[in-house]
Image: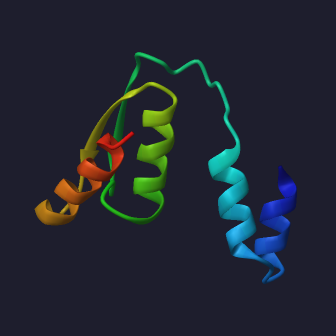
Amino acid sequence: IDEPFTAMAAGGDRGYASRLLRETHMDLGLAGRTALVTGGSKGIGLACARRFAAEGCNVVLAAGNAEALAAARASIAQP
């Protein structure tokens, strides 16, 4: 899995890395656990929240912007 990160560091195809990470499923054994994600309305916080939700976690989001937080929640809740 180091290949996409190497490609990104070298200015390569960021879309490739993003697609690979979305398509890769890791079972981290977190199903049923609770994950608190700060900065969860955008960027890496939102990406982490989505990954935790995909793993079966109960996700608690925190962010400074209520509207962005509501949009993030809605985007994670969609199947």
Answer left or right for 48 relative to 64: right
Q: Residue at x 28, y 55 (%)?
A: 72
Does residue 1 lie above or below 68 as drawn? above
Q: Residue furthest bottom?
A: 11
In the visual, does 1 lie left or right of 38?
Answer: right
Residue 48 located left or right of residue 2: left
Image quarter of residue 5: bottom right
Q: Tell me if residue 17 comes above or below residue 54 in the rendering.
A: below
Q: Residue at x 23, y 59 (%)?
A: 71
The percent position of residue 21, horizontal first and vertical second, equals 68, 51
Q: How many marks?
A: 0
Image quadrant holding the C terminus, namely: top left
Q: Is residue 75 left or right of residue 8?
A: left
Q: Position of residue 77 (x, y in %)?
A: 30, 41
- Residue at the extreme left: 66
Kindly indicate the quadrant of the structure image that contains residue 12: bottom right
Could you tell me residue 31's position as x and y percent? 48, 18
User: What colouring does the structure picture have?
Assistant: rainbow
Compared to residue 55, the image places residue 67 above or below, namely below
In front of the other: 7 or 36: 7
Q: Position of residue 19 (x, y in %)?
A: 68, 59
